Amino acid sequence: MGCGATHLSLALSLMALALAGISIYKNTHVATVMEDFDVKMESNSNILEQNSDMLSQEFCIFAAVGTVVAEAIRRERRMGASLIRLFFHDCFVDGCDGGILLDDIPGSFQGEKTSPPNDNSARGYEVIDQAKQRIKNMCPGAAVSCADILALAARDSVAMLGGLPYPVRLGRRDARTANFIGSLTQLPAPFDDLNTQLRKFRAKGMSAQEMVALAGAHTIGFARCVTMCNDNNINPAMKSTLKCNCPVNNNDTNLVPLDLVTPDFFDKAYFDDLNRNQGLLFSDQVLTGNSTTNDVVRRYSNNGFLFLRDFNAAMIKMGDLPPSPGARLEIRDVCSRVNGNSIADM
């Protein structure tokens, strides 16, 4: 990766989060934090506009992305969960290469956006586009990939919704193609049993503990009723309490919180739900069906800080997943399409 994990990048990362108005806190409701963001975002945007020439490029990039993500979460808190998921769905298919962002080209190219795991489900693409434009406006000459912006947006979302900030290394490149089939075979699915999940994570070099930690991202966000009305996707114990009018069609927009208690707050409540057999997804609840993964679930339920620490470590490791060997890479000027010749012309 282009830039190593240096003390400088960690310092810049934490400074940028501070500029974006992010504070580390516990037991504080998200609404209070976002009220602070409202005040600080306007001030920090002015700071960027007035002093962008005095900021290092890396610091400017971090701050520009942070302000866009904060604005998006202020408009809709669910967007933070969506940005974390978008990063995960990018990295788990052929590495962190921005492939999920490429638009289909009718008749010649089918990307990952319209694959079943992502179609009408993955969201937040417009936030990544806005962050790319904000960097162009505020950080002239800065070369940052769309894959890097995905990594920064996920990190900022974690911190803004109650988790802990962590360093993000820049230097990723964007692939000039995507993998429709790979999104079907590589991504974990809500109907996956435990062995299938473990196999998919092992294929990415991730341990059982790291898998459970990353599953903790379900402590925020929502599932669509169209997903939950499929008996294969839901924890059977939760079917009788499901607040969806099933059956539904694919255009149904009704949502169900993945965390029953605090779906807008990044905390350990997801693991408390699992301990009570109240995990919403089948793939979530099966984490308690194996002694190894169940022990991790219990540890995180008993120690929220341990979960936040391990989640960050797993996100950093996942963010280092490399593109496929031999992949043609670039830094895209527009995140939804390749530079120069189109994919159709290659």
Image (tube, helix red, strand yellow):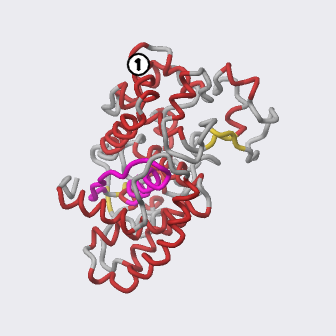
Q: In this view, does 272 lie above or below 93?
A: above
Q: Which of 78 and 343 is in front in this view?
A: 78
Q: Which of 157 and 341 is in front in this view?
A: 157
In percent of width and height, residue 138 lies at 38, 79
161 drawn magenta: yes
Residue closest to the far front: 27
Q: Name the residue under label 1.
A: 295
Q: Is residue 249 above or below residue 301?
A: below
Which residue appears at 55% of the width and 57% of the height?
124
Which residue appears at 62% of the width and 29% of the height?
280
Q: Nearer the viewer, residue 79 or 128?
A: 79
- Residue 328 visible to the viewer: yes
In percent of width and height, residue 161 lies at 50, 52
Q: In which quarter of the image is the C terminus?
A: bottom left
Q: 10 Å neighbourhood of mark 1: few (<14), some, or many (≥20)?
A: some
Which stretch did the figure color magenta?
149-172
- Residue 340 visible to the viewer: no
In percent of width and height, residue 342 lies at 45, 64
Which residue appears at 77% of the width and 34% of the height?
243
Residue closest to the far bottom: 50
Query: In screen coordinates, is 187 left or right of 138?
Result: right
Residue 198, quarter of picture? top left
Amino acid at pointer 1: Asp
**Secondary structure type for disc 1:** helix
Which residue appears at 29% of the width and 45% of the height?
320
In percent of width and height, residue 17 lies at 37, 62
Q: In this view, does 148 lie above or below 89?
A: below
Query: In screen coordinates, is 232 left or right of 166?
Result: right
115 drawn magenta: no
